Amino acid sequence: MNKRVNRTAVLISLLLTVPVLASNSLLKCIVGQDEYQPAEPGQVTMKGFLCGRVEVNREGRLKKHIKEEHLLAGFRKRPGSHPWIGEHVGKWLHAATLAYLNEPSDIALEHKIKRIAEGLMACQMNDGYLGTYAREDRWSLGKGRGWDVWVHKYCLIGFLSYYQMTGDQRALQTCQRAADLLIETFGEGKMDILAAGTHAGMASTSVLEPMSVLYQLTGEPKYRKFCEYVIRRADAGPKLLTNIEKTRTVQSVGNKKAYEMMSNYVGLVEHWRATGYQRGLREDMKRGHPQV
């Protein structure tokens, strides 16, 4: 990373992020090189209070309390019971995978991860859809909807983590089928991705993160092109970059919803890793730079 870093809130948030994948062993396309490399989960040993809390999380929340039937209910019987029910399985897969990589002797957790991942794969529809809405309600806002792309984001993140853990090509293929459906649905002359997400569109444009990682893993130009489209829309709608360049504060970005906003900035970091995209990372970048 360029050592001349921008001391704005944007950069602070970017530096606090962790890549979706724990290692670069499967990556085919990575350009931006981090100044510091995070330790692999298996290299991390914790003691004391933090160790105890991590163990409680692994043994209690990940292995015991969160059930397969609850994580997959909205996919097995669409529509789900609430609009964003589908986000939880991807979050669980990501967290559980990292916990397993930290403690690879945990066979029970390994089996549960594989069982849930395979269960979610079985729920993917023929066209690649990985959401929990009825067909007529896909990608729509209003009436409690608007989380379809957001759910796909977390399913992609979960499967990408699982692929890193296992090398299971079916997981990568599942991601590609879902990503191809997103590309077929959104873009120039198609549906506007801003119109499919809440919080000024920041929920849907946060799909930039896993799509950038998918490009890193496959080198497929169509995924890079889609990421560029998403960045354009994120800047046209919530002004992800333009407003923070003008004001040096996140208070002017979108509707200021921190969770969805941060997810977008994580996506920009992954896009930088994949392509070397510089906007927002360099202190000397001024207004008037080339657009994506």
Image: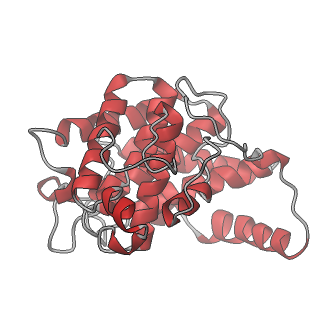
Residue occupying the point 66% across, 47% down: 111
Residue in the picture at 72% in, 50% down: 100
- Asked whether 152 or 216 is in front, the reply is 216
Q: Which quarter of the figure has residue 95?
A: bottom right
Say whether residue 254 is visible. Answer: yes
Residue beneath the point at 84% across and 68% down:
51
Which percent across, then down, holds residue 223? 35, 32
Left or right side of 128 for 170 = right
Determine whether 211 is above or below 170 in the image.
below
Dividing the image into 4 quarters, which one contains the C terminus?
top left
Say whether residue 36 is left or right of residue 160.
right
**Residue 220 x/y as whole percent:** 39, 23
Residue 127 appearing in the image: no
Q: Position of residue 181 (x, y in %)?
A: 25, 38
Q: Quadrant of residue 239?
A: bottom left
Residue 55 image offset from top left, x and y in percent: 79, 67
- The foreground one among 187 and 139 is 187
